[in-house]
Amino acid sequence: MLARTYPSRILEPKMREIKSYAGNTVELKCKAEGRPMPVISWILANPSVSAVGTLVIKDVSVYDRGHYKCIASNPAGADTATVRLQVVAAPPGIMEEKRQQLQAILGHSLQLPCTGHGTPQPSVHWVLHDGSMIQSNRPVSDTRISMYENGTLHIKDVTPADSGKYECIATSSTGSERRVVTLTVILQESAPQILEISKRLTELSYGDQLRLNCSATGNPKPRIIWKLPSKAVVDYWYR
C-alpha cells in the first residue's frame, strides 16, 4: 500500500518583509510541509540566483535588497511565498561603554575616550555637565578642557565643580549614538605631615610673650594640638 502524498505547503506568510542593517548577515528561512517532504529553493529575479534550504546572505548591502521568492515543491505540487528584503545603512557606533561611572582625584588630569565608527565616519562632540558643547575644532571658554580629534575629552586639574554627567554624541547621516560618563571628583586622603615648626630651643626673659609655630598638611585637614609642660593639652581654638 502506497503512503498517502499531499502537496507542499509553505508555513510562512505569503508576503513578508525583513529589514537589515548593511554589513549584517541575513538568513531567509522558508518552513514548509508536505509528503514527501518538499524541497526548498529560492529565486531572485535580478540577478538570477538560486539556493536550496535557508538562504544566507553575508555582509548584506543595499544591492541585495529586493524580492526573494521561496519555492517549496514535491511530486504532489508546489507552493510559493515572497520575502521583501530592505537594507538600510547602520547608525554609527561608539567603541567604549555606553554608560560609565568614573571617579577622579582632585587636582589630577582626566581623559574620557569616545571612538566613533561607521559608514560614513561619524563626527563626535561632547556635551559637558553644564550643558555646553565642545568639539575638536572649536575653542572653549574653559581652557582646562579640550577635545582631541579622535574624540577623547581631556580635563586638566579636576575640581569638585567638574562632577556631573558628560555626554559624547557620534552623528552621521545614518543616525546617532550616545555615551554618558558620570564623573565624581573625590579628595585623596593623606596622612598629616608637619611642614614647619619653631626652633627646638627658644630663650625668653620673664614676662615675654611666647609664640611657637606649627603648620601641617594632610587630607582631611589635620587638627593641630599642643601638649604643654604641665601635661595640659590645648588645640587651635584655645585662648
Image (tube, grey):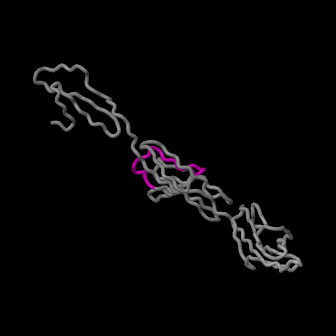
| Residue 8 in the image: above or below residue 25 | below
Query: In this view, which residue lies farthest toward the left?
Result: 207
Instruction: Give the position of the N terminus as an image quadrant.
Output: bottom right
The answer to which quarter of the image holds residue 236 is top left
Q: Residue at x 60, y 61 (%)?
A: 171
| Residue 176 in the image: above or below residue 232 | below
Q: Is 162 displayed left or right of 232 in the figure?
A: right
Evaluate whether residue 143 shows in this view.
no
Q: Is 51 displayed left or right of 234 in the figure?
A: right
Q: Is 153 displayed left or right of 206 in the figure?
A: right
Q: Nearer the viewer, residue 49 or 208?
A: 49
Q: Residue at x 27, y 27 (%)?
A: 197
Residue 63 at x, y percent in the picture: 78, 67
| Magenta highlight range | 148-164
Residue 212 at x, y percent in the picture: 22, 27
Instruction: Give the position of the C terminus as an image quadrant.
Output: top left
Is 157 inside the magenta-drawn segment?
Answer: yes
Q: Residue at x 47, y 58 (%)?
A: 132
Q: Nearer the viewer, residue 4 or 62?
A: 4
Residue 203 at x, y percent in the picture: 18, 19
Q: Nearer the viewer, residue 97 or 195?
A: 97
Evaluate whether residue 92 shows in this view.
yes
Q: Nearer the viewer, residue 187 or 8?
A: 8
Is 82 inside the magenta-drawn segment?
Answer: no
Q: Is 159 displayed left or right of 200 in the figure?
A: right
| Residue 161 in the image: above or below residue 1 | above
